[in-house]
Image (cartoon, rainbow, N blue to C red):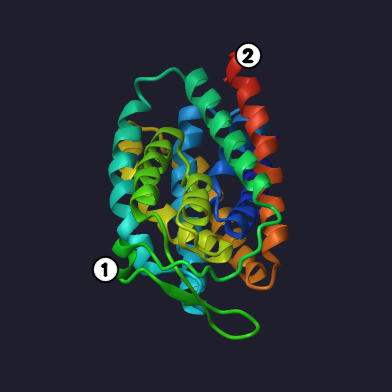
């Protein structure tokens, strides 16, 4: 295969990853890492470095559209970023210490757990809750509203400290695994904090770029970001994320949940298999 053909295939694969990442709030990285490692036989450390660059591109591309449409909650995103950034720096430090097979297996387990949680909630209806918001959410003015065909729908925010702690874990996984860790972020906001699914996915898209930028500097310093690999991947993911952002506003939440579950379950099984057989 020539260099041009390889670059084109990387671009097309990244285009798909960016679109699915924007639709599900996962970011392109969670799909790109298995794609690069399993499909293109890229070294895991370099795949993680390219993935972090693409995550920043995904977030930049999709997040601007979601903020403009009024789906993302910027106050929640910036508040939770304190936890994810600290966790991301810790995770990026650990990546040079732990064996590749451990990292791949951990990656797969995180994906499978995320798929299980998402599958349990596949039929959950998004109805306004009569319970008041968490007192800390009221103090920080984290409540908001998001657009629906019937007009803006307000929502409440619960268990702020629980979501904040889980975001620290999400940040560590981001730095360790080269992903935006959108799977954990979406679950933390959707399941722990009680936010509507579209608010969770769009706020996750906004956050993953900041989290990835925190750990990308560490990867760059260690020489794990190859410009020839990162460039087509970044362009493909950026374009895919813009297309995905257009589709999300019209898509039913139940179908987004099923897409979320199906994609990460498949990738989780593949990464665990490769990690256990030592094929990385």
- In the image, what residue occupies the spot 38% across and 27% down? 95
User: Within the image, what quadrant is residue 49 found in?
Assistant: top left
Q: Secondary structure at mark 1?
A: helix
Q: Is residue 109 above or below residue 49?
A: above
- In the image, what residue occupies the spot 56% across and 49% down? 28
Please tell me how many numbered marks the rendered image carries: 2
Q: Secondary structure at mark 2?
A: helix
| Name of the residue lying farthest toward the bottom | 151
Q: Is residue 27 above or below residue 114?
A: below
Q: Which residue is mark 1?
A: 139
Q: Which mark is residue 81?
A: none
Placement of the C terminus among the 4 image quadrants: top right
Placement of the N terminus among the 4 image quadrants: top right
Q: Which residue is mark 2?
A: 277
User: Within the image, what quadrant is residue 236 found in?
Assistant: bottom right
| Name of the residue lying farthest toward the top | 277
- Camera-near label (1 vs 2) is 1
- Of pointers 1 and 2, the one earlier in the residue sequence: 1
In the drawing, does residue 81 fall left or right of residue 199? left
User: Rounded to the nearest whole Å, what is the CA distance between mark 1 and mark 2?
Assistant: 50 Å
- Residue 8 visible to an observer of this rendering: no
Residue 234: give x, y in percent of width and height.
51, 52
Residue 40: give x, y in percent of width and height.
64, 32
Residue 267: give x, y in percent of width and height.
65, 36
- In the image, what residue occupies the spot 52% across and 41% down? 229
- Residue 17 visible to an observer of this rendering: yes
């Amino acid at each position: 295969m020539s260099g041009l053909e390889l670059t084109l295939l990387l671009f097309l694969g990244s285009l798909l990853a960016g679109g699915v990442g924007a639709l599900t709030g996962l970011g392109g990285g969670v799909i790109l890492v298995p794609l690069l490692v399993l499909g293109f036989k890229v070294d895991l450390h370099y795949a993680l470095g390219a993935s972090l660059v693409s995550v920043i591109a995904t977030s930049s591309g999709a997040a601007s559209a979601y903020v403009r449409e009024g789906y993302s909650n910027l106050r929640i995103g910036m508040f939770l970023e304190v936890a994810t950034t600290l966790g991301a720096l810790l995770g990026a430090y650990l990546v040079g210490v732990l064996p590749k097979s451990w990292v791949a297996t951990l990656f797969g387990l995180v994906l499978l757990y995320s798929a299980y949680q998402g599958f349990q909630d596949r039929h959950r209806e998004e109805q306004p809750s009569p319970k008041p918001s968490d007192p800390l959410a009221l103090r920080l003015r984290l409540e908001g509203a998001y657009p629906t065909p019937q007009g803006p729908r307000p929502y409440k925010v619960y268990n702020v400290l629980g979501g904040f702690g889980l975001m620290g874990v999400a940040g560590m996984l981001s730095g360790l695994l080269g992903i935006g860790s959108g799977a954990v972020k979406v679950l933390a906001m959707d399941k722990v904090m009680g936010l509507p699914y579209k608010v969770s996915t769009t706020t996750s898209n906004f956050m993953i770029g900041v989290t990835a930028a925190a750990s990308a500097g560490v990867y760059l310093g260690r020489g794990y970001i190859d410009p020839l690999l990162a460039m087509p991947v970044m362009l493909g993911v950026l374009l895919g994320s813009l297309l995905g952002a257009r589709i999300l506003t019209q898509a039913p939440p139940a179908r987004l949940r099923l897409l979320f579950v199906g994609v990460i379950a498949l990738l989780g099984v593949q990464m665990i298999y490769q990690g256990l057989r030592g094929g990385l």
